């Protein structure tokens, strides 16, 4: 495992560079990311380049065997650029130009901006093409889908629609524009969703396509940069760092043309009082690994107490900094880069704490980081190894967008159910993949397909064939609701999946925050919320696993099981409390032959990375309490956020070290 730091030499006097690099070397830092915001220092005036300082600091790291990832500095166009091209700044939904002085102030489609961005990337990549210390390139920083509403972006949006549909009649028909007299009679009438009214007032078909365009358009900007990097540095490793932002791009498409996934990982430092609300970042990590189904990089990792966009919050509890880094490794990261080496003393982010505080005296967190770097060195042999999973959860950007466009009921959001399933599966000590809905499913025994809301015929076909051949799939409420254009399908739900589930939805009740009860046939009763599909079993082999125990539909089916081909299909019509999933999944795992561990305490996470000769089992205490439990017949005791690693030989799978 490679440990790195994000470093901003342009923020510090040169007298700090060598001592910083020395301390990094001594601490075990192997990788540094730099320059993603440094445009004004690299090109202080148009066409006047100043790479000397970057050469120097790269040289300092090189002498110490520390590798470098360079960010293209395009997130922050210098003031001279904005002065020259005042319209290079994005326009918001309210039609107003974004304020300058913060970052991210660039329209991905402005020709002047693109020319200058292209030129600085050209110069940087040519300059460091043969510099072996530079091991990878990060494109821009935390890119979001293109929600710029300027004239150029509007033109691109219209062109995207023209390419997709060809003519206006097709758009009018597929969007159902006859509603509210929304039919277009010229391309110029098609605008992006300008205005400050809620998106839910707009046509969902139009909104879904706009989100798809916004993501595709951001990806065109990524490709524009990647092409320059690749032309000048053939064979260079290229990435961009993503996070779960408001205007999320489609991660699968974003990284299709890039070499590896990078993710910015900031788990909350405040532990929830109610253990039931505990929320593990393992979900995000598994999702990131699944994007390319390979190891990934955490480009920014929690190092100190956050605060700057909002008031400061809790400093990381002892063990957290190191534990969350090792957790990322346990879920497939190969490099974890900590944000940031030293806390800024100026600028908007001065209270987003790095490894070293304003005092410039390395303290408690730094000591923990140093220990982490030592532990990481010991795990080197597991870099690039696989996490083999028999269970997968499907994720879809279309569904994410569609749920944001039309929130289904109070408290319901797209990622909640995938997370509920994920957390329950973790309780059984399983490796879990989270993969794109279009991913190949062979090799999995169990696939959780939560809220398959927007229907893609290819995905439907793939799921039928997976079950036909003996796979097990769990569907949930809000499946088969929409066609590929985000219009409702005029069929009983779950529409396209009904043949698989062997049940249909007679009526649904979006109960929101109200609580209902669900009773399993074995007598277990759980609370449920948000949504109740009142189900009618209709297949010859459909069994009712649980029924509603309250409301006017008391006694109606809530969860069913069906046989299809050689496989089994479950349908969960409601959103239960965590324990309901733990209970339900135990039975399902047993039935589909996935081996699991019974009796783990809450938030003890176990994953295994397997290499050619050796495997490592990671046992993580993701709580602020000491945990004692029995695993494989032996007593395990883990301190808060402690990670224990057990190595075994792959051939005989014998435990060799604890
Ligand atoms: C990330 C961003 C960093 C820094 C960090 C802490 O989202 O990429 O540049 O701002 O958050 O706020």
Image (spheres, helix red, strand yellow):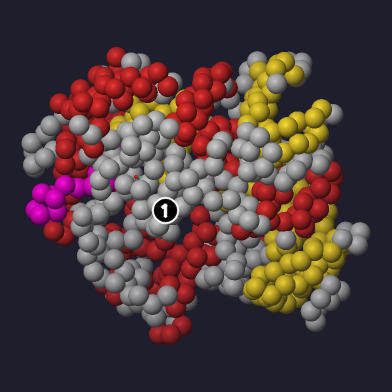
Any magenta on residue 209? no
Residue wearing tag 1: 312
387, 31: nearer the viewer: 31
Vertical arrangement, residue 318 with respect to residue 185, above or below: above
Please tell me which residue is depicted at 31% across the width and 25% down the height of the picture: 20
Please indicate, yes or no, whether residue 134 appears anywhere in the rendered image. no
477, 530: nearer the viewer: 530
Query: Could you tell me which quadrant the C terminus lies in?
Result: top right
Magenta residues, start to end: 71-85
Percent x, y for residue 115? 16, 45
Quadrant for residue 74, please give it: top left
Percent x, y for residue 177? 43, 78
Judged left or right of residue 115, residue 310 is right
Quadrant for residue 137, please give it: top left
Percent x, y for residue 67? 35, 22
Could you tell me which secondary element the residue under label 1 belongs to?
Answer: loop
Percent x, y for residue 632? 82, 29
Please indicate, yes or no, whether residue 288 appears anywhere in the rendered image. yes
Please tell me which residue is depicted at 70% across the width and 64% down the height of the picture: 575
């Amino acid at each position: 495992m490679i440990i790195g730091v994000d470093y901003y030499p342009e923020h510090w006097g040169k007298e700090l560079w060598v001592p910083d690099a020395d301390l990094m070397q001594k601490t075990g830092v192997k990788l540094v990311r730099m320059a993603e915001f440094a445009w004004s220092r690299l090109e202080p005036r148009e066409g006047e380049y100043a790479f000397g300082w970057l050469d120097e600091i790269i040289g300092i790291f090189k002498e110490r065997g520390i590798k470098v990832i360079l960010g293209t500095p395009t997130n922050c166009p210098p003031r001279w650029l904005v002065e020259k091209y005042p319209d290079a700044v994005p326009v918001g939904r309210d039609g107003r130009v974004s304020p300058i002085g913060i970052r991210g102030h660039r329209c991905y489609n402005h020709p002047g901006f693109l020319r200058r961005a292209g030129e600085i990337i050209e110069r940087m990549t040519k300059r460091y093409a043969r510099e072996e210390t530079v091991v990878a390139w990060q494109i821009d920083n935390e890119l979001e889908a293109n929600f710029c509403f300027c004239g150029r972006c509007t033109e691109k949006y219209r062109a995207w629609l023209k390419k997709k549909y060809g003519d206006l009649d097709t758009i009018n028909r597929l969007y159902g524009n006859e509603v509210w007299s929304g039919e277009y009679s010229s391309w110029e009438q098609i605008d992006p969703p300008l205005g400050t009214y809620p998106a839910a007032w707009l046509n969902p078909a139009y909104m879904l396509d706009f989100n798809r365009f916004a993501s595709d358009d951001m990806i065109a900007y990524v490709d524009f940069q990647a092409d320059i990097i690749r032309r000048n540095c053939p064979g260079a490793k290229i990435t961009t760092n993503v996070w779960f932002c408001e205007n999320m791009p489609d991660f699968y498409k974003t990284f299709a043309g890039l070499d590896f996934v990078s993710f910015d990982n900031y788990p909350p430092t405040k532990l929830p009082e109610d253990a039931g609300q505990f929320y593990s970042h393992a979900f995000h990590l598994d999702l990131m690994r699944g994007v390319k189904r390979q190891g990934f990089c955490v480009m920014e990792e929690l190092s100190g107490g956050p605060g700057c966009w909002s008031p400061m919050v809790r400093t990381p509890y002892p063990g957290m900094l190191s534990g969350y880094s090792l957790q990322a490794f346990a879920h497939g990261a190969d490099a974890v880069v900590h944000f940031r080496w030293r806390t800024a003393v100026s600028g908007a982010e001065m209270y987003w704490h790095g490894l070293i505080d304003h005092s410039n005296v390395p303290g408690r967190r730094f000591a923990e980081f140093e220990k982490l770097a030592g532990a990481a060195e010991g795990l080197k042999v597991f870099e690039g190894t696989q996490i083999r999973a028999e269970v997968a959860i499907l994720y879809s950007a279309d569904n994410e967008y569609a749920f944001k466009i039309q929130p289904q009921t109070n408290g319901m959001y797209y990622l909640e159910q995938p997370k509920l399933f994920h957390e329950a599966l973790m309780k059984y000590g399983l490796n879990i993949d989270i993969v794109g809905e279009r991913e190949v499913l062979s090799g999995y025994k169990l696939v959780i397909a939560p809220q398959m809301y927007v229907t893609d015929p290819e995905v439907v076909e793939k799921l039928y064939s997976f079950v036909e051949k003996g796979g097990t799939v769990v569907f949930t409420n809000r499946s088969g609701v929409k066609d590929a254009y985000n219009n409702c399908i005029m069929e009983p739900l779950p529409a396209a999946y009904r043949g698989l589930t062997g049940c249909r939805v007679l009526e649904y009740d979006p109960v929101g925050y109200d609580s209902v009860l669900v009773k399993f046939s074995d007598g277990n009763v759980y609370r449920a919320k948000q949504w109740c599909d009142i189900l009618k079993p209709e297949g010859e082999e459909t069994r009712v696993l649980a029924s509603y125990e309250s409301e006017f539909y008391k006694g109606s089916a809530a969860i069913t099981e069906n046989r299809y081909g050689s496989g089994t299909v479950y349908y969960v019509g409601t959103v239960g409390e965590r324990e309901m999933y733990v209970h339900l999944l135990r039975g399902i795992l047993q039935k589909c032959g996935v081996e699991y561990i019974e009796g783990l305490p809450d938030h003890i996470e176990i994953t295994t990375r397997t290499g050619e000769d050796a495997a490592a089992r990671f046992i993580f205490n993701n709580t602020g309490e000491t945990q004692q439990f029995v695993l494989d017949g032996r007593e395990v005791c883990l301190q808060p956020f402690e990670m224990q690693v057990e190595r075994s030989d792959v051939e005989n799978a014998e435990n060799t070290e604890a």
